[in-house]
Amino acid sequence: MRWAILASGCLVLFGNYYAYDNPAALNKPLQQHLGLSDDEYAYVLNLLYTVYSVPNIVLPWISGYIADRLGHRRILIWVSVIVVLGHMIVCLGVERRNVPVMIVGRVVFGMAESLSVVQSAMTIKYFRGQELAMALGVNLCMSRLGSVLNDVLTPLIWSRTNVDVAFWGGFVTCVLSLGSALVLVVLDRRQSRKLGDRREREEEDALGHAVRREEDGEEEEKEQEEKWQELSEVTNERGGGGRPLDLSLEPPLKEGNTMLSCKDQDHEHQHQHQRHQPLSSSQTNVPKKGLAKVKKIVRDMAGFSLSTWILMTLACLLVGVIVPFNSIHAGFLQMRWYHDDPKHAAQVTTVPDLLAAVLVIPFGYFVDNYGHKSWLFMLTGLLIGSAHVALGLFRLATPIPALTLLGIATAINSLFQSAIPTLVAEEQIATVFGLYTSGINLVLVVVPLIVAKLMTLDPTTYTHVEIMFASIGFFGFILAVWLKCLDKNGDLDKKEIQSKPVEVQA
């Protein structure tokens, strides 16, 4: 059942990733369709990604907190419906060549970024302490396949039809993902009921043992009373006219299944009297629900370790390189290597995502069985920095070797999520994932705007953009080294699979 739940969860994010990169896959054709100049389109393209991230600076960690309290199933259905509605609005804007409508649709579409928060929390629920890194890697693998298919199919659909139909193809994948979310909810509910029934049987068995022990205690007490009575009669008969045996000291009194002395009973009555005392005014002064939730979130955040904050900062910065580059790589490759050949450029852009989709499973297996996450995090920063140095500063005959390094880095980057449960308490997982997603979206608001500005300064070679990406990658390497130094107990480098399987919490 766990693997069926994982399969359904993988498909939940497929449509989101496919539709998310529709504008990037149709970089130049979309510009011609909208009739915009190079400078205008540079800002519009990056604005489509920026407005997607704006609402998610706050929403994901709020939704993560709500999901921890209200349940993941309800939130999963809500955000899946929002994905469908948001991309439908984008498609209508593309049909009418109306940029403001497209932006509104991307805002609505972006409000469903919480989908990954809830889906990741549900995956952790069934795989924590077992194949967690590989399960999260498989999730990202399927998501990346959505991006890969978008890079291949969307330009192909455009070449045979038009830009409008290509965008509506993304809408179809969003509807399919909504169906997968419904299947996931059904499977999760069924599994939770099975676990609940099993626990109920265990509780009934425990209660039966307790009842039997109580019955045995009553029989033993009855036998003790009969022995006392027999001893009294024998003593009176043998004593003749002597003083009869004093039976005023009776057997100890019993409370439930526990033998209590008179002194213990007095203490118990006093404790019950205190327990039924009315609450004081300070105890009944409960804060408002909204303020209490905010305080709870702030307290949780204040309790996070420095390692948790560094890990989230590192992950957000590296995603802040990977995603913005994916939004411009089709145009970048056309400018540098594949002039006026958008189909060929789109096919080459699939190299990082396709390689990441293939490598994420073996990397996940390695981490689950051998650990060493912190070393892989350092390697990710080095690979990203080196790849963008090669793309930006060297005249390569082909970009494929550098894109291959980015694919390896993207695969390792998927393991960052599996490190989060290592550093936080179980009841805080969804909240941390929400905060992590908010940080990513904050970076994805700022970085695309910087990229747009740098693209206008250097519209033909993108050298300034590549230097910025390389700098972020090398800074991520420094943060990874710091994280390794803080991990004195080696928690991040421990393997995920334990000697004993962890029971799933219903």
Image: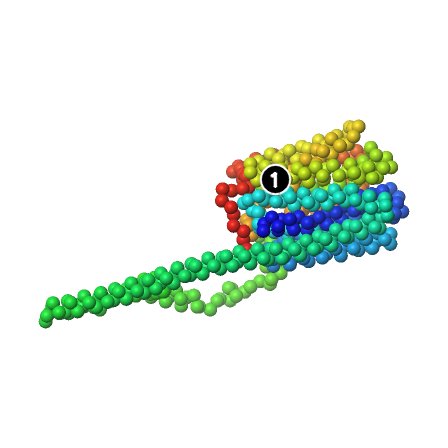
Give the x, y percent position of residue 476: 66, 36
Instruction: Classify 128 as above or below 246.
Output: above
Relative to residue 501, is residue 99 drawn left or right? right
Q: Residue at x 61, y 42 (%)?
A: 134
Foreground residue among 495 and 135 = 135
Residue 129 in percent (x, y) is at 54, 45
Place residue 323 in its image quadrant. Answer: top right
The image quarter in which residue 481 lies: top right
- At 22% across and 65% down in the image, what residue appears? 227
Q: How many marks?
A: 1
Q: Which residue is mark 1?
A: 364
Q: What residue lies at 70% left-to-right and 55% top-to-bottom?
A: 178
Name the amino acid, label 1.
Gly
From the viewer's perspective, tell me whether residue 195 is left or right of residue 211. right
Secondary structure beneath dot 1 equals: helix
Quadrant that contains the C terminus: bottom right
Q: Is residue 127 visible?
A: yes
Quarter of image, res 371 = top right
Q: Nearer the viewer, residue 502 or 405?
A: 502
